[in-house]
Image (cartoon, grey):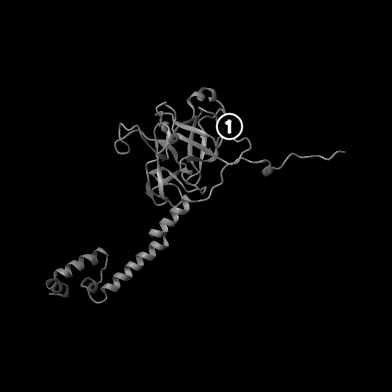
Amino acid sequence: MNRADMQSLYQTRRDRKQKFANQHHHYSDFGVLLHYWFDERARAEAETEVLLYKLSRNELGFQKLDRYLTAVSRPIELTRNLDGFLHHGDIVRLKWIDKSEGRHYFLAALPFTIDDAGNFGEPCLATATEDSRIMSRSAFHVFRNRNDVANHIPITYGECIMICTLEGTGHKMLECQSTSLSSCARKSGHQEVKWVKELTGRSLWKVVHREKSERRKTEGKYIPNNNNVVITHLASGQNLAFEKGTVMNTVMGKEKEVAGHIYQDRFRREEDENVWQFEAPSLKPEDYGGPISLPRC
């Protein structure tokens, strides 16, 4: 009978349990398998080796969190224009104003994961944040869904548009999901709003005037920035809605939910939950200089 056979004969339950744990951690040394004095040291060395390996590959928890916060909080500059209208490809923010408390909320993307290139992973929720910083998760491109119109012509009321995250985030499209039991109650009239990679018919929206009596008059007119508008989903007819009574605890703090729903009062007028603003700074005369005065000859 050799040493291994003798040792297996006198193994206790604790030894077998320790042997299984050591084999799970790939400890092949015979002495380590029997819980000798250097067992804990070998385990600590192996765990340190794994820790250093993950540290070198930026796979530790705090490194992933730092990479996530850096990617979603990257500072962005909004598009500045002279005419004050919304243009194709402009970088803007969607702002919702709480008139009762005087707070400002901004539409934001909340990805569950971030890849090594900084692209937002899916699922990517649409939320409203109170963070006033202009950053990659709360600034978006607005594109018209037409190729026969020059880009310098402003976007008009009733025109089909797409709202997309910026370059370097994966170009996620704002989409209103169809009603499902897993997201919203079937008869509640609410639909889930997310950011998705694939462009489909559910990623198309249009901007209309807040007052229903003015919508026919303003159809085809340019959309001014920093004015109250209603953003309507083409496929479902639902409006982009700010959910007042909701609070989400996220890694970015407490945020509000955003959904697809039509909020109307008893007179069928749009309530504040459906009213947004395309926020973009306008160039002032002092920013680009006054008129040139030529000297007289």
Provide residue 208's location: percent of width, then percent of height.
49, 29
Residue 199, percent from left and from top? 44, 35
* Residue 43: percent from left, percent from top: 29, 70
- Along the line of sight, the residue nearer the viewer: 41 or 95: 95
Q: Is residue 28 left or right of residue 202?
A: left
As drawn, the residue found furthest toward the front would be: 100
Figure check: 58 above or below 258: below
Count up the numbered dots: 1
Instruction: Report the residue at 18% width, 66% height from top.
Output: 17
Q: Quadrant of residue 50?
A: bottom left
Residue at 56% in and 46% down: 77
Task: Indicate the amino acid at tag 1.
Answer: Pro
Q: Residue furthest right?
A: 297
Q: Quadrant of the C terminus?
A: top right
Q: Secondary structure at mark 1?
A: loop
Q: Which residue is mark 1?
A: 154
Q: Which residue occupies the foreground of this view, 39 or 277?
A: 277
Quadrant of the image occupied by residue 240: top left
